[in-house]
Amino acid sequence: MNRYQIYLNPKSVDTIDNLTRLINLSRSQIIRDVIDKMANEYEKLLVKTEASRMKDNPLLKMAGFAKGPGKDISHNVNEIYLKD
């Protein structure tokens, strides 16, 4: 774990502090949990965005890498390379 210094909205800190008393977790743990949850959601968005970019990349389409599911060329290599 690394240490970071951030600025937080005082109202958010008050809410977190009220929650700490209610559920008996530290302020730091609650902030880490919230950041981890949001980071996971943003990671999903990044994966979808990258997949979309790869799918729409004209160079990859020309090369045949972005054909979509079920088009695994490793199963029909001989058909591709031995084709006249």
Image (cartoon, grey):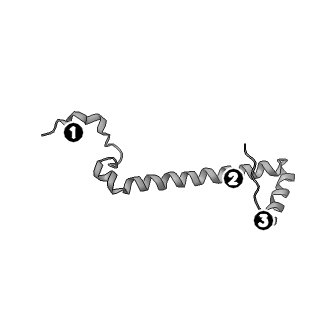
Circle 2 residue? 35
Q: Secondary structure at mark 2?
A: helix
**56 w.r.t. 77: above or below:** below
Question: What residue type is disc 2 on?
Answer: Ile
x, y percentage for residue 7?
A: 77, 61
Question: What residue type is disc 1 on?
Answer: Ile
Q: Earlier in the sequence, mark 1 or mark 2?
A: 2
Q: Earlier in the sequence, mark 3 or mark 2?
A: 3
Q: Secondary structure at mark 3?
A: loop
At horizontal 81% and vertical 57% (from top left) the residue drawn is: 16
Circle 3 residue? 9
x, y percentage for residue 1?
A: 72, 42
Question: What residue type is disc 3 on?
Answer: Asn
At horizontal 40% and vertical 52% (from top left) the residue drawn is: 54
Viewer-closest of 34 and 59: 59
Residue 80, label in figure: 1
**9 w.r.t. 3: above or below:** below
Q: Residue furthest right?
A: 21
